[in-house]
Image (tube, rainbow, N blue to C red):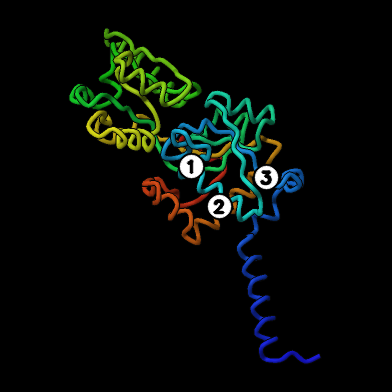
Amino acid sequence: MKIGKSGAAVMAGFAAVLFSCAAFAGEGSKLVPQPIRAAGKITVGSQQTFPPIEFREPGATEVTGASADLLREIAKRLDLKLEYVQAEYAALIPGIEAKRFNMASGGISDTEEREQKLDFVNYMLSGGSAMVRAEDISQYNTIADFCGKSVATLLGSRVIMAKVEEASAACKAKGAVEIRAEQLPSAPDARMQLDLKRVDAYLGDFPALVYMGAQFPGKYAIVGGNYMLTPYITSWGFGKDNSGLRDAVKVTLTEMLADGTYKSIMDKWGVGGALLSEITVNLPASKR
């Protein structure tokens, strides 16, 4: 059978579309575990109160932010839907263990301790910083200036709490009053305690604190301008028995790094400076 010029053009165009779709799907789609493929979706546990990384605007139902955009693009390339499950920060690891969701997100950081329970795909370089009321900023330069003061952070923030405990011990060693730390369920709770002057600082993720401060010009300030209490690697967590999804996500984000989509999304949310040069698995700040 002969195909005319117009028919050949149609066939060529059809072939190009098929090739494009196959190329777009990428290698990661081959790694998706069958139960997730059958379900047609990835379920993501997240506190949804972590702007600009993963959050919901007041009154909105859709989760937005840098991580949300990255995960939606990843799910699209894996030919899956993305479904969020609300979970407090401290409930993310237990939620994975109980199989409430396929992966944990919302600002969780990779640590050697947490790797005993989960595997992590690392997607952002970040760090813990301290936000104070603007009128108090001249009092503080580092965590060492908080002897006798009180700070708030989120439940489950072991990396930050370890540094607070270390600084508090240093206060005690030099005869000063220790730092009082209060752990709260969410970022809005911590900010409220700061507003009410029940704590002197909110210790949290640097991008989130910068974003929060931008919502209230002149009200808050970051200690030292960009002081990092501790660097850490923001990651997505997966069960030890879910290496297929972990690898599918890692491979797909690596493709997004190569084609510029990763940078474009991070830049959109003002966190382009937190890009990783390589997408890794289980490589926390302590090993870098």
Q: CA distance from mark 2 to mark 3?
A: 13 Å
Position of residue 5 in the picture relative to residue 211 (left or right): right
Q: Point out the residue furthest to the front here.
A: 59
Q: Which of 254/283 is in front?
A: 254
Where is residue 10 drawn, in percent x and y? 67, 81
Q: Earlier in the sequence, mark 1 or mark 3?
A: 3
How packed is label 3: few (under 14 Cα within 10 Å), some, or many (20 or more)?
some
Residue contact at pointers 2 and 3, CB within 8 angstroms: no
At 37% from the left and 38% from the top, the residue drawn is 207
Q: Position of residue 27 (x, y in %)?
A: 65, 58
- The label nearer to you, 1 versus 2, is 1
Where disc 2 sits, the SS reads helix
> Which residue is found at the position 64% from the left and 50% from the top?
248
Q: Residue at x 55, y 58 (%)?
A: 255
Q: Earlier in the sequence, mark 2 or mark 3?
A: 3
Cα separation, mark 1 vs mark 2, equals 12 Å
Name the quarter where the N terminus is drawn. Answer: bottom right
Q: CA distance from mark 1 to mark 3?
A: 18 Å
Is the Cβ of the residue at disc 1 closer than 8 Å to that at disc 3? no
Residue at image mark 3: 41
Badge number at residue 73 = 2
Amino acid type at image mark 1: Thr
Determine which residue is flagged by label 1: 64
**Secondary structure beneath label 3:** strand
- Marker disc for residue 247: none
Examine the rendered structure and indicate whether residue 31 appears above or below residue 3: above
Secondary element at tag 1:
loop
Quarter-of-image position of residue 191 = top left
Name the amino acid type tagged 3: Lys
